[in-house]
Image (spheres, rainbow, N blue to C red):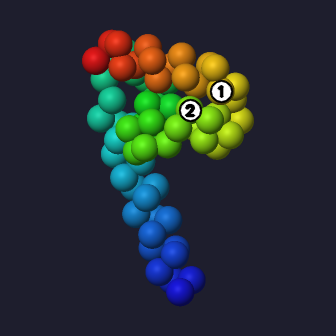
Amino acid sequence: MADTMHELVKATKAVFLVQLQGLEERDKRDKAEVVLARAGYTAAEIAKLLNRGQAAVAKSIERARKAS
C-alpha cells in the first residue's frame, strides 16, 4: 500500500509540474492557483493548501480566467 501511495504522489507531482510548465507567461504569477483550480480545487481549498487568503486566491483565479 505504501509503495502504491508513493507512486501516486510521484505521478501527481509530475502532472502538476507539466501543467505549470504549460501555462502561458501571463499566468506565471498565479500559476499554482491556476493549476489547482483547473484540477477542481475550490478557492478555499487552494488558499488552505498555499497558506494564502481565500479572497486573494479567488482574485488570482478570476484574473487568469479572464486572460484566457
Label 2: element kind? helix
Q: Establish if 33 lies above or below 25.
A: below
The x, y position of residue 36, in whole percent, is: 47, 40
Whichever of labels 1 and 2 marks the residue nearer the N terminus, that label is: 2
Classed neighbour count for the residue bearing mark 2: other residues with Cα under 10 Å, few (<14), some (14–19), many (≥20): many
| Residue at the image position 35 percent from the left and 13 percent from the top | 66
Q: Give amino acid for label 2.
A: Ala
The x, y position of residue 16, in whole percent, is: 42, 48
Q: Note whether residue 22 is visible.
A: yes
Q: According to the image, label 2 marks what residue?
A: 43
The one nearer the camera, 18 or 43, is 43
Left or right of 38: which side holds 42? right
Furthest toward the bottom, the residue is 1
Left or right of 62: which side holds 21? left
Label 1: element kind? helix
Badge 1 vs badge 2, beta-carbon distance below 8 Å: yes
Q: Note whether residue 29 is visible.
A: no
For residue 54, the mark is: 1
Classed neighbour count for the residue bearing mark 1: other residues with Cα under 10 Å, few (<14), some (14–19), many (≥20): some
Q: Give amino acid for label 1.
A: Gln
